[in-house]
Image: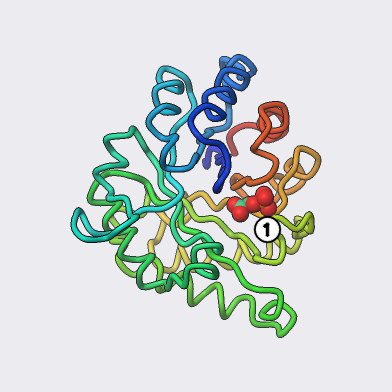
């Protein structure tokens, strides 16, 4: 059984004050018996304050990125132990904006996965193809390679903590969501690769979909057998819409 998991990815939006205002408006909207797991990934500078505001609530704290080294001359970077100190349980790695805008390669993502595991932070590993790759019929090839290389450091014994996110680049922030069928087709491929690699543990790994997820399309996406949650950008920025998403996301599967 895979518990649905929604993650708010705020990207470079909401500093400390806005993050706290969100928590004040959002937490009272949560049901006591939340069936869906939920986490918020604010910008680094808001992690500490938001972590304190979320303490005692069912909402977990996530980072949007991490550097694999434990310390040193890496100007502008954040080490895994710093995320532990801020209270993070999860960290997003390999987001397409990191891959495309900052040139991050899958081998670097794999180093991040290893560093996170060493600090007991669960990695949320993103994969996804460009529109060109999809139109050329190369989606599986591109995603398969990202998956193999990004998970190269993950030992089967630790596979259970992994969360995957399929985010077609053409659907991120564009309002153009993959249809549930299109997403399921890729999720099934990812599932097959995970099972091939990790055996039964691969079947328990949650695979989120990301790319223009909204309160009015989340239920149809999550109704697909291999879509176990969502990584949400735009629709997670307002407490009302993120709460509505949660409400639409259903219970254990
Ligand atoms: P979006 O972003 O929901 O705004 O499309 C999703 C993501 O990039 O994680």
Check the image and report above or below for 32 versus 161. above
- The residue at which mark 1 appears reads as 172
Q: Residues within 10 Å of mark 1 (few under 14, many from 20)?
A: many
Label 1 SS = loop
Count the marks.
1
| Horizontal side of residue 181 vs 237, given as left or right | right
Toward the viewer: 183 or 98? Answer: 98
Where residue 4 sits: x, y (%)? 57, 39
Residue at figure coordinates x 74%, y 64% from the top left: 182
Q: How is the image coloured?
A: rainbow
Toward the viewer: 204 or 238? Answer: 238
Is the shortest distance between ligand 1 and the CB of mark 1 under 8 Å? yes
Check the image and report above or below for 208 versus 48. below
Toward the viewer: 210 or 187? Answer: 210
Q: Quadrant of residue 140?
A: bottom right
Residue at figure coordinates x 21%, y 60% from the top left: 73
| Horizontal side of residue 32 vs 90, given as left or right | right
Quarter of the picture holding the C terminus: top right
Q: Quadrant of residue 96?
A: bottom right
Residue at figure coordinates x 28%, y 61% from the top left: 155
Where residue 121 sits: x, y (%)? 33, 44
Q: Is residue 226 visible?
A: no
Q: Is residue 145 visible?
A: yes
Q: Which residue is outermost to the bottom?
A: 136
Where residue 216 sits: x, y (%)? 81, 40
Check the image and report above or below for 204 versus 27. below
């Amino acid at each position: 059984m895979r518990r649905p998991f929604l993650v708010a990815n705020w990207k470079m939006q909401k500093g400390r004050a806005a993050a706290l205002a969100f928590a004040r408006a959002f937490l009272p909207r949560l049901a006591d018996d939340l069936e869906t797991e939920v986490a918020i990934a604010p910008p680094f500078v808001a992690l500490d304050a938001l972590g304190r505001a979320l303490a005692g609530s069912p909402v977990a704290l996530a980072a949007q990125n991490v550097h694999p080294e434990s310390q040193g001359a890496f100007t502008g970077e954040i080490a895994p132990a710093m995320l532990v100190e801020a209270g993070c349980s999860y960290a997003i790695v390999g987001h397409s904006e990191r891959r495309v805008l900052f040139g991050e390669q899958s081998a670097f993502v794999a180093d991040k996965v290893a560093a996170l595991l060493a600090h007991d932070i669960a990695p949320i590993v993103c994969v996804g193809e460009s529109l060109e790759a999809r139109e050329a019929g190369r989606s599986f090839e591109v995603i398969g390679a990202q998956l193999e290389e990004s998970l190269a450091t993950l030992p089967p014994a630790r596979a259970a903590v992994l969360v995957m996110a399929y985010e077609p680049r053409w659907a991120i922030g564009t309002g153009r969501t993959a249809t549930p069928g299109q997403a399921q087709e890729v999720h099934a491929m990812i599932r097959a690769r995970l099972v091939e690699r990790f055996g039964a543990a691969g079947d328990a790994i949650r695979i989120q979909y990301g790319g223009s997820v909204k309160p009015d399309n989340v239920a149809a996406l999550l109704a697909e057998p291999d879509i176990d949650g969502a990584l949400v950008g735009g629709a997670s920025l307002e407490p009302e819409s993120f709460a509505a998403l949660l409400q639409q996301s259903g219970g254990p599967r």
